[in-house]
Amino acid sequence: MKIALPTNGENLEAQIEQHFGRAKNYLVYNDETKEFKVYLNPETSGGSEPPPDFLNNLGVNVIITFGLGSRAQEKLKRMKIKICKAVEKNIISNIEDFRQNQLIELGAETSNDEFLLK
């Protein structure tokens, strides 16, 4: 399983960026190999590929984020990519919370409005 998190950092100790689409980077963590890779956000680095398409093409299964727009939410849902609400911890702590089913999944116990950027 591949887990993506928006960040301006480049390691597992970095903080999660507040908004999915405005992050400088996406850290993609492979839960099977315990390895990760950091990718530049194509939209903020001059590319034209939307982040949902980019992450889907990388084989991401789950996104952990504080907030994202309704269009990105709908696109990710159509792609069958799970979206979980991040907590105020670093990346590795959010991954651990996800593994222990401690993060709220969009569509499970919350409405879409709770995931929109404040």
Image (cartoon, grey):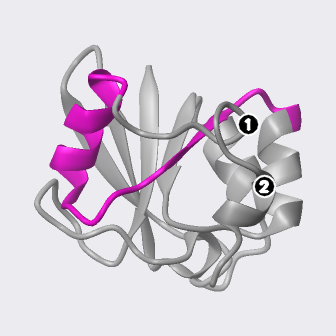
Pick whichever, 102 or 67, lies toward us: 102
Image quarter for residue 87?
bottom left
Does the segment drawn in magenta span residue 11?
A: no
Q: Are dots 1 and 2 in contact, CB under 8 Å?
A: yes
Does the segment drawn in magenta span residue 96?
A: yes
Residue 68 appears at what percent x and percent y?
Answer: 67, 67
Image quarter for residue 33?
top left
Task: Give the CA separation, mark 1 to mark 2.
Answer: 7 Å
Residue 54 appears at what percent x and percent y?
Answer: 67, 51
Identify whether 89 is placed above or below 77.
below
The three-letter amino acid code for the residue at tag 1 is: Gly
Neighbour class for label 2 at 10 Å: few (<14), some, many (≥20)?
some
Pick whichever, 41 or 7, lies toward us: 7
On the rendered structure, is 45 left or right of 73?
Answer: left
- State the SS at label 1: loop
Pick whichever, 112 or 1, lies toward us: 112
Q: Tell me where the magenta segment starts and ends, as one range.
A: 78-101
Tell me the residue that label 1 is attached to.
Answer: 107
Tag 2 or tag 1, which sits nearer the N-term? 1
Identify whether 62 is placed above or below 93.
above
On the rendered structure, is 4 left or right of 80?
Answer: left
Tell me the residue that label 2 is attached to.
Answer: 112
Residue ID at (50%, 40%): 104
Residue ID at (77%, 70%): 69
Residue 47 appears at what percent x and percent y?
Answer: 70, 76
Residue 56 appears at what percent x and percent y?
Answer: 68, 38
